[in-house]
């Protein structure tokens, strides 16, 4: 509950401010983009981070502001050596 693509991100953002340990969230769009937007800008109407398939983002709470530390998209990872 609270992590589906149609859920509002506000309640989760509120809960995350009380976490004292690192948290990993796995989900789908548009929820993940809305959640990240709300955390970084205060509005889920803006999209500062675009999540494609298998994208990962690291955010950190610094004081009372969420900060984007890094973003990784699968297109940036080499396929590895081919035989």
Image (cartoon, rainbow, N blue to C red):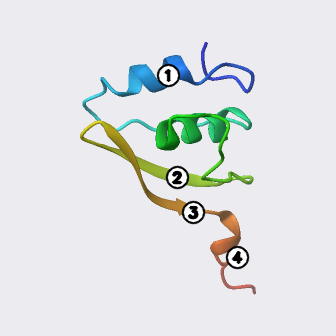
Q: Earlier in the sequence, mark 1 or mark 2?
A: 1
Q: Nearer the viewer, residue 63 or 12?
A: 63
Q: Nearer the viewer, residue 75 or 62?
A: 62
Q: Residue at x 45, y 51 (%)?
A: 58
Q: Nearer the viewer, residue 30 or 78?
A: 30
- Residue 37: image quadrant is top right
Q: Earlier in the sequence, mark 3 or mark 4?
A: 3
Quote the CA–CA distance across marks 3 and 4.
Answer: 14 Å
The residue wearing badge 2 is 57
Quote the CA–CA distance across marks 1 and 2.
Answer: 16 Å
Q: Earlier in the sequence, mark 1 or mark 3?
A: 1
Give yes or no for contact between labels 1 and 2 (Cβ–Cβ under 8 Å): no
Q: Residue at x 55, y 41 (%)?
A: 36
Q: Earlier in the sequence, mark 4 or mark 1?
A: 1
Query: What crowding class fits label 2: few (fewer than 14 Cα within 10 Å), some (14-19), or many (20 or more)?
Result: some
Question: What number is the disc on residue 33?
Answer: none
Left or right, 59 with reference to 35: left
Return the x and y of residue 53 as percentages of the image width and height: 74, 52
Quote the CA–CA distance across marks 2 and 4.
Answer: 20 Å
Return the x and y of residue 3 as percentages of the image width and height: 62, 23
Between disc 4 and disc 1, the foreground one is 1
Q: Residue at x 70, y 76 (%)?
A: 79
Q: Residue at x 66, y 80 (%)?
A: 80
Question: What number is the disc on residue 79?
Answer: 4
The residue wearing badge 1 is 12
Give yes or no for contact between labels 2 and 3 (Cβ–Cβ under 8 Å): yes
- The quarter of the image holding the N terminus is top right
Q: Nearer the viewer, residue 81 or 8?
A: 8
Q: Earlier in the sequence, mark 2 or mark 4?
A: 2
The residue wearing badge 3 is 72
Quote the CA–CA distance across marks 4 and 1.
Answer: 34 Å
User: Element at badge 3?
Assistant: strand
């Amino acid at each position: 509950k609270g992590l589906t693509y149609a859920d509002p991100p506000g309640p989760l953002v509120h809960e995350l401010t009380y976490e004292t340990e690192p948290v990993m969230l796995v989900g789908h769009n548009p929820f993940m983009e809305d959640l990240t937007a709300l955390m970084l800008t205060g509005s889920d109407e803006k999209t500062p981070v675009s999540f494609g398939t298998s994208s990962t983002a690291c955010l950190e709470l610094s004081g009372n502001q969420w900060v984007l530390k890094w973003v990784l998209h699968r297109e940036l990872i080499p396929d590895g050596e081919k035989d």
